[in-house]
Image: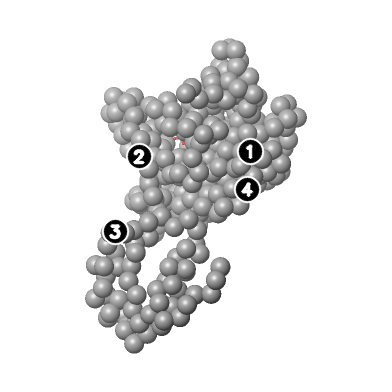
Amino acid sequence: MTIRFDDQVVIVTGAGNGLGKSHALAFAERGAKVVINDLGGARDGTGASSEAANAVVEEIKSKGGDAIANGANVTNVEEVEAMVAQAMEAWGRVDVLVNNAGILRDKSFVKGSMDDFQLVLDVHLMGTVYCTRAVWDIMREQNYGRVVVTTSSSGMYGNFGQTNYGSAKMGVLGLMNTLVLEGAKYGIHVNALAPTAGTRMLEDLISDERVMDIMSVESVSAGLLTLCDKDAPNKTILCAGAGGYASTQILETEGIYLPPEDQTPENVRANMNEITSLEGANAPMMGGDQTNKFVAKALAHFGITPPAG
Ligand code: NAD
């Protein structure tokens, strides 16, 4: 079935360039009214300009779509709240929030400054927190909402020189995991996108223009849209790039139980193969699942019947 966003209001942060621009154009093409947020700075977050956001709005309007520009810095709570107020005033609802704005301040851990570390956390993690908090009550009242956080392979698996960025990008997954639980009864789904695309963010890493072309932003936006419509999944980490689509899962192995007399570092090490074996691994629904699993095994060892409920 065709995925459409008619009569829906979508906010895309960092939509003046790269992936955000592509997401915004794709939403508009499929009927959405779109807030084009962008601070308009350089890749490292310096500077600001309304030019990029305005150009995207013009492009959408020239194709018959509906969009408004917004220059909020996602690290500024007041500006973020004003952005959401602007969307509400124009269109009266917010159906989708795509947290996409981002910067880079790459340096090895030993060389990077703590100011840069803080700024990267502020933009990616706190920016996502502020924007999501600003739409959360609206989505709860609507009994409908779709939120996407933008993570990265760099956070999930590591990347030399990106401790700040990687920390922030894992942080948004932690945010997603609990928002999923808190938004469930209000029809709010929260998912994550792990993109890889030939934008200015990758221009130092990939010099071959043919590869940059193949890594199109449009290929990523095709995946992003599936996280945002009414049939969207919940708590899915969708990886997308160059026409490849995959999903990352956070699994816990079944593990082992050691009775008190065997609970020594030596015994834990001796059982490491079984502890880390993926056989029987699963993705816990929430943190408490881990506690319940361990306690159930221990209670069974002691022959104690777990209390009901
Ligand atoms: P980009 O630099 O082309 O676009 C990012 C946009 O965010 C820019 O237009 C910038 O002005 C805007 N922005 C930056 N700070 C802002 C702020 N404080 N407030 C509002 N807007 C701000 O980068 P991109 O490659 O399109 O990246 C988009 C997202 O995807 C980022 O979150 C990035 O970390 C993530 N990502 C990208 C890749 C990739 O391969 N390009 C890989 C993994 C994750």
Say what secondary structure mark 3 lies in.
loop
**Numbered-mark total:** 4
Residue under pointer 2: 246
Residue on which the image places disc 3: 278
Query: Element type at marker 4?
Result: helix
Residue ID at (73%, 35%): 85
Crowding near pointer 3: few (<14 within 10 Å), some, many (20+)?
some
The location of residue 226, given as percent across then percent down, is 47, 32
For the point 47% across and 77% down, which residue is it?
305
- Return the mark for residue 185: 4
Q: Residue furthest bottom?
A: 261
Quarter of the image for residue 153 reads: top left
- Foreground label between 2 and 4: 4
User: With 54 as the anchor, is 81 left or right in this view?
Assistant: right
What residue is shown at x 34% (from left), y 58% (from top)? Answer: 281
Which is closer to the viewer, label 1 or label 4?
4
Q: Could you say where residue 174 lies in the image, as x and y percent from the top left? A: 50, 54
* Marks 2 and 3 close (CB-CB < 8 Å): no
Name the N-terminal-most of marks 1 and 2. 1
Amino acid type for the residue under numbered disc 2 = Ala
| Left or right position of 75 against 44 | right
Residue 266 at least partly seen = yes
Distance, label 3 to label 4, CA atoms, is 32 Å
Q: Secondary structure at mark 1?
A: loop
Q: Is residue 269 above or below residue 208?
A: below
Mark 1 vs 4, N-terminal side: 1
Q: Nearer the viewer, mark 3 or mark 4?
A: 4
Q: Which mark is residue 144?
A: 1
